[in-house]
Amino acid sequence: MRIAVTGGFGFVGSSVVSELADKGHKTFPLSRRNGFDLTEPETVRKKIGEIVPDVIVNCAAHGGSLHYVSEFAADVVNDNLRMTLTLYKAVCGACPSPLIINPLSNCSYPGESGIQREEEWWNGPVHPSVWSYGNIKRMLGVVSDCYRMQYGIRSMNFLIPNAYGPGDSKDPNRTHALNGMIIRMLQAKKKGDTQFVIWGTGKPVREWIFVRDIARVFAIAVDEKQERTLPVNIAQASGSSIGEIAVIIKRLTGYEGDLVYDTSYQDGAPEKVLDDSRFRELFGDFRFTPLEDGIRETISYYRGVLEG
């Protein structure tokens, strides 16, 4: 199949491109790096018309840490909404047949939800700490539904927990939470710091997913090429607290300082763990990368890029 991947040189997108290419698909990574700007309607329409993809995996996004999406909330909303509307409008005008696969962050669930179930996705407001990013991911679901209703454009939306792994930003304020902690702890070890500061209380529980597991799920979904009327959790139904993750990173990096907590940083929602019932119905015995194995590989990656 011919598969376009927006944000194809980014964190999730590059893993998706690699996985799909390994499966024998013709992939087209698209980003500003190769002249594809999702905020420019004519550029997007022309490129989609040239490629005529069977599937578009829509990994492009403007995001960052919890603190980043609060500080730059208006920019996050503006850029992501423009990219979403531009993509769907371009597909409608240039090539209305592809399936669009959208990764949606699970921060779009209600802020007070503990176990996150797809049928409860709209049952309450997004947590204030991620108001911009969580709501814009809900809006992506709305846009996909509306284009299906009027134009028959098919979409498959996946709700994804906190991702980590190789290929993310080196800026701890722009990278995903677990990756950011690895970067900062490696830097603390190199400088000989006697304390490592965890942002917040360390108590919030999150579900974590290795980035290549997301790509593997998308590769299976591409082969099925079936529209899903409801979002599907990519879920393991288990989580670890920020503090527990810090302890694992400390052990695997060999950092010898003390872990301390800066409670002036906001925590976000107390728990985010996804229910895996629907995922298991659709993806059977899919095996996720064990947490420590994924963290170990991510540490190795960041040692290389930070010292290179």
Image (cartoon, rainbow, N blue to C red):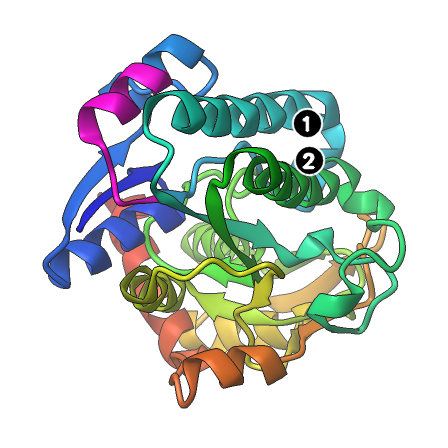
Q: Can residue 205 be seen in this view?
A: no
The one nearer the camera, 308 or 47, is 47
Amino acid carrying label 1: it is: Val
The tag on residue 69 is 2
Q: Does the magenta stretch include residue 209?
A: no
The image quadrant where one finds the C terminus is top left
The outermost residue toward the bottom is 285
Depth check: 129 or 133 in front?
133
Question: What's drawn in magenta, residue-wise?
Answer: 44-56
Q: Quadrant of residue 286?
A: bottom left
The answer to whether 188 is drawn above or below residue 208 in the figure is above
45 falls in the magenta region: yes
- Place of residue 55 in the rendered image (x, y in percent of width and height, measured from the top left): 31, 46
Residue to which mark 1 is pinned: 77
* Residue name at image x 39 percent, y 50 percent: 12
- The residue located at (40%, 28%) in the rendering is 91
- As drawn, 75 above or below 51: above
Magenta stretch: helix, strand or loop mostly: helix
Q: Position of residue 97 (x, y in %)?
A: 34, 39
Characterize the local packing of mark 1: few (<14), some (14-19) or many (20 or more) Cα atoms within 10 angstroms: many
Q: Which residue shows up at 39% across the image and 60% down it?
A: 165
Q: Marks 1 and 2: CB-CB under 8 Å? A: no
Separation (CA) of disc 1 from disc 2: 9 Å
Q: Is residue 295 above or below residue 267?
A: below
On the image, the x and y values in percent for residue 45 come to 35, 18
Helix, strand or loop at mark 2: helix
Q: Which residue is drawn at 34% across and 54% down?
A: 302
